Image (cartoon, rainbow, N blue to C red):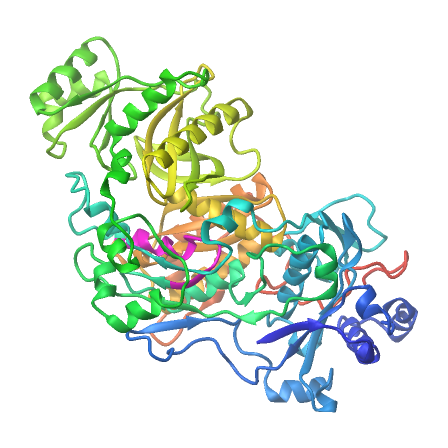
Amino acid sequence: MAKLRPARAGEAARLTELVMRSKAHWGYDAEFLAACAPQLRIGAGDPARRRIVVAEDGTGGDRTGGEAEGRGVAGRAVGGWGPEPGDAERADAKHGDAEHGGPVVLGLASLDGEPPVGRLGLLFVEPAAIGRGTGRRLYRDVIRRAAGLGFRRLIVDADPYAAGFYRAMGAVATDAGAPAGLVRFEVAPVPLADWARAWTGGRAAVHLGNVAEYNAQFADASLDPEQEAAHHYACLAAFYGPRPAALVLPRAVPPGWIGLVGRQLGWDADTDTDAEPGTGAEREAEVEMEMEVEVEVYDGLAGRGPGLCDTVRSRPALAARLTGAGLPLVPWGQTAPFARLAGRPWRPRALRYESKSQAHGLFGRILAAGGHPGIVLPAQWRADTRRAAVRLLAARARAGRSTVLKSEHGVGGSGTTLVTPERVRSAGGARALLRGLPRGPLLVEEYVSGPADREEPRDLTYDGFVDARGRVHEAGGAVMDVADGGYRGATVGPGVVPGWAREPLLGFGRAVGRELSAAGYRGWFDVDFVADGTGRLAPTETNLRLTGPSIAFMVAARLDALRGAGHLVRICDRVELGARLPEAAFDEFCELLAGRCARLGAVFVPAIPTAAFEPAPWMGVLVAATGRRALDAAERLVRAQALSAGAMFEAAGFEAAGFGGAAFEGAGVGGAQPVEPASASEPAYGTEPGSVSESEPAS
């Protein structure tokens, strides 16, 4: 794995030679290269003045996985970006300090100018190292350093050969001011969001996928006793914070999954994006070294049933490893088994507002205190018996009113049923309709019809958390995809929440957070709303746990720090697959989707892989982009390719020993055309993004 360090004045001549080799890689003639040479020369004072960082290969081998000593169960350490160049390639390259007995230099990058506007002036990779992640690492390091130094805008004037790379890395193309023959991009460097840093104290954390365990404690009749869907949803543990140190999962995950997720979200190296940025002087004086980070994966820990944390406790070596390193422990939600594992007191009353009727009462008390004119509370009645529910439902149907029936602790739409008067009549009456619902008490709630314009968002949510000291932190608002009362996904990012809804949503969400803090709750929470069509929001429930939208917020914060500000992130809970693929085929399928989305300037992350091996296969995904058009195109591409998986599978003639990836290239998607033909994993470039001369066609 390449390591980064500051360039030294004494190696300026050798770095210039690397730059010229990289430039020549693209077939420029000797005359053109000679004309470029004065502008490309690195002087003795440039390493400090231009903040040049070099990538060097000092690891001497592949560190992409394997058993970690003393783990107690099968844990996989995931770090790295695949094999580094082999010995023969290094010998052929004849670059860097190899001739002088030192580590091999693979590439370099510079951060030019002074805040707030700077340039990515140089980004060159040794030709033998192109396609192995070196350029990606150097680019991300420049973004990180720029954010720490206070740069808020970076300009990249890219060789056309490099345009696909910068687009894939999240830079935004602009028409303004590019020198002739070059493509101009801009990036907005930002540090990790304050709330995201506060969530785990700026550190990597142990993420425990105890979704089923959390649900089971409420014994809601609407939930599957075996919690199969919850075990799949536990894969979202990969995203419980900006950066995991270890994942603890109930089901076994495909071997390639976490490696792809790590590459997409930059887990391969600890770039200090979560640490507090120092002063400009401090950042000028030092360049943080990138150290390899291994994400330990402990999967397949739960059999049938919901338990996870008690399973961990039953394995003392594993429990000691996870709890003894002093890292934050982040569960999906608070449970008694988690409290035992973490050594914390268990206070079940702190979760009382997970109950939908208790939350409704809380909302009413907040509104009674005044100060929220944009919020309206739908009426709700509790029916302890089916007879009472029949009476309420029948009366509302006779009055021509639609009703929402809820169980106390349903999740993701389970236990929630929208009942129209027409549905009551077609079922043969309220009594007949209720026979098809799970047993237990029901909440009968007034239905909020939503905006008349179908393009207007109807379902919104506020996300935040209460820290250990009782302080409320705000992640923001999101728009959810809800159909027939069932949650299907969410989108977060700049401009997602309509302007008219922003202040009412944030203000009421903060008020709920303060009340939860006063009630003793500590952890993530959300407040779900429905827009009523008259410019008001109706709160419907609060969830005292992580959620799908919370995952999107985590990923957005990570991508903003990694790639520049402004990411929209969409989580799609269920993307149907046209075939159940073997693990190796599924891993390659996801890699191909990542590549095709990268060509759109979007990021694809497989979020829930384990359901891909069910008889009716599906997967959860995350897509991200800095514009709505690219985001929508990426989702369309992923859904279409997923449905075509069966045809691709047959065309590829996959057997256990191999998989024909080329078959995937044939499935086109309307409105999702590739922008650049370069490789999406890392487009080959090795060129200077800066301008050399006005007449230069590529630099």
Q: Which of 651 and 107 is in front in this view?
A: 107
Q: Which residue is drawn at 31% across and 61% down?
A: 249
What is the total number of numbered labels drawn onto the structure image? 0
In this view, the residue in front, 225 or 516, is 516
Depicted 446 relative to depicted 185: above or below: above
At 41% across and 62% down in the image, what residue appears? 327
The residue lying toward the viewer, choosing from 364 and 118, is: 364
Q: In this view, does 351 lie above or below 84?
A: above
Q: Which residue is drawn at 41% across and 45% down?
A: 572
Q: Is residue 524 left or right of residue 567?
A: left
Residue 653 visible to the viewer: no
Q: Which residue is drawn at 61% across and 88% down?
A: 87
Report which quarter residue 383 is drawn in: top left
Q: In which quarter of the image is the C terminus?
A: bottom right
* Image quarter hosting the N terminus: bottom right
Is residue 578 or residue 184 the one in the foreground? 184
Instruction: Return the x and y of residue 513 as percentages of the image width and height.
Output: 40, 34
Q: In which quarter of the image is residue 697?
A: bottom right
Residue 339 coordinates in the image, percent (x, y): 27, 54
Left or right position of 564 against 433: right
Does residue 647 show up? yes
Residue 508 in the image: state x and y as whole percent.
43, 26
> Horizontal placement of 7 versus 597: left or right?
right
| Region rendered in magenta | 231-246
User: Is 584 a magenta residue?
Assistant: no
Residue 210: image location, x then y, percent: 28, 54
Does the stretch in magenta take in 234?
A: yes
